[in-house]
């Protein structure tokens, strides 16, 4: 058995073992469980008619769903958040629909409290993170005849990234916490159709020619902060840092997201999202995403899942 297969099997076995320890007997009282969530539908639209300054009519929509599962009992805390977003944009005159957002992410932290002081609660912890996308991603351009074309660059489970780590969990409240994991395994999965034609010096999300996975061992820091900065204006910040001990540990992967929600009423809000990503396995530049739109809010807290 080669070392890569052994790494993958060990990673999956450790993941199964750690999270099997967190299975909760269905006879436990529901008071130990808390669920909350919301769905937001963002719409952006522009239209031009006889507009001398130029411009292209467009319409876009994004559906974003956040759902939280929280369990607390006798010093144990299990916090899980599922994030799902998908958005499309249609520009007048373009034959292709283009994605504005596409993300499926699960974050789960299991902790056992060992200290409680004035600044917050400290716990031993293990965390799990999974990320992928729903639909195919394309690079758009033109062929040799000047016609618009597109080349597939990614798809569902290509890439898919899973991280599992152990460390310490500091929690001030559900709106402010930091998890550090000095021992973190990271597994990247891709479809071989994207790696079979690579050269020996090229990689696809860090995966080498002809392979469909990459295993890393490193350290991770993840944090979350949410606050009402002004009346009816809420700021959320998520930060994820990761360093691979086995390959260029000084190159730190960064994923930072700011979500500003300006509430109009219970049903309507304006959302402004900034996301900054740096991962030199993907591209050796900072990736920036910005989304602004008017949102229709749906409370999912009372929906059983």
Image (spheres, rainbow, N blue to C red):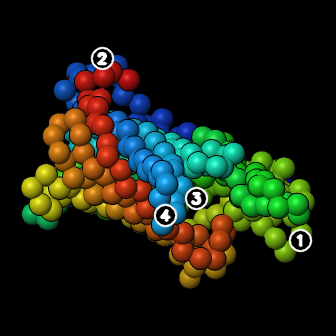
Residue that label 4 marks:
52
**Callouts 1 and 3 close, C-beta under 8 Å:** no
- Which percent across, then down, holds residue 8? 70, 50
* Foreground tag (4 vs 1): 4
Residue that numbered label 3 is attached to: 185
Which residue lies at the image location 78% right of the left edge and 53% below the top edge?
A: 149
Residue under circle 2? 27
Crowding at dot 3, Cα within 10 Å, few <14 / some 14-19 / many 20+, comes out as many
Left or right of 175 on screen, residue 53:
right
Residue 260 in sight in this render: yes
For numbered disc 1, what is the local secondary structure?
A: loop
Q: Is 19 placed left or right of 238 in the picture?
A: right
Secondary structure category for the residue under label 3? strand
Do the residues under discs 2 and 1 have CB atoms within 8 angstroms?
no
Distance between mark 1 and mark 3 Cα atoms: 25 Å
Real-space Cα separation, disc 4 to disc 2, in angstroms: 68 Å
Spatial distance from mark 4 to mark 1, Cα to Cα? 52 Å
Q: Which quarter of the picture shows residue 201?
A: bottom right
Disc with the residue nearer the chain's start (2 vs 3):
2
Residue at 38% across, 23% down: 305
Q: SS at mark 4?
A: loop
Counting residues from the N terminus, which is met first, the one under dot 4 or under dot 1? 4
Q: Earlier in the sequence, mark 1 or mark 3?
A: 3
The residue that mark 1 highlights is: 200
**Eye-nearest disc, 4 or 3:** 4
- Kindly report which numbered mark, 2 or 1, lies closer to the viewer in this rendering: 1
Residue 108 in sight here? no
């Amino acid at each position: 058995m080669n070392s890569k297969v052994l790494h993958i099997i060990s990673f999956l076995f450790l993941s199964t073992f750690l999270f099997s320890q967190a299975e909760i007997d269905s006879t436990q009282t529901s008071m130990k469980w808390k669920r909350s969530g919301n769905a937001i539908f963002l719409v952006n639209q522009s239209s031009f008619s006889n507009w001398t300054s130029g411009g292209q009519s467009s319409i876009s929509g994004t559906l974003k769903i956040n759902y939280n599962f929280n369990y607390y009992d006798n010093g144990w805390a299990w916090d899980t958040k599922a994030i799902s977003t998908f958005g499309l944009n249609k520009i007048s005159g373009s034959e292709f629909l283009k994605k504005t957002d596409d993300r499926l992410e699960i974050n789960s932290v299991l902790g056992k409290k060992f200290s409680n002081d004035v600044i917050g609660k400290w716990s031993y912890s293990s965390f799990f993170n999974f990320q992928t996308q729903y639909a195919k991603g394309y690079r758009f351009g033109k062929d040799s005849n000047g016609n618009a074309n597109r080349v597939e660059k990614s798809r569902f489970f290509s890439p898919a990234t899973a991280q599992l780590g152990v460390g310490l969990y500091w929690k001030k409240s559900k709106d402010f916490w930091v998890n550090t994991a000095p021992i973190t395994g990271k597994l990247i999965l891709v479809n071989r159709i994207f790696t079979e034609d690579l050269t020996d010096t090229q990689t696809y999300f860090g995966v080498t020619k002809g392979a469909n996975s990459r295993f890393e061992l490193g350290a991770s820091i993840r944090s979350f902060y949410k606050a009402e900065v002004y009346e009816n204006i809420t700021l959320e910040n998520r930060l994820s840092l990761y360093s691979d001990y086995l390959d260029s540990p000084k190159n730190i992967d960064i994923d930072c997201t700011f979500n500003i929600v300006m509430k109009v009423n219970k049903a309507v809000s304006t959302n402004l999202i900034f996301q900054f990503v740096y991962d030199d396995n993907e591209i050796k530049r900072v990736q920036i995403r910005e989304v602004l739109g008017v949102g229709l809010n749906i409370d999912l807290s009372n929906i059983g899942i």
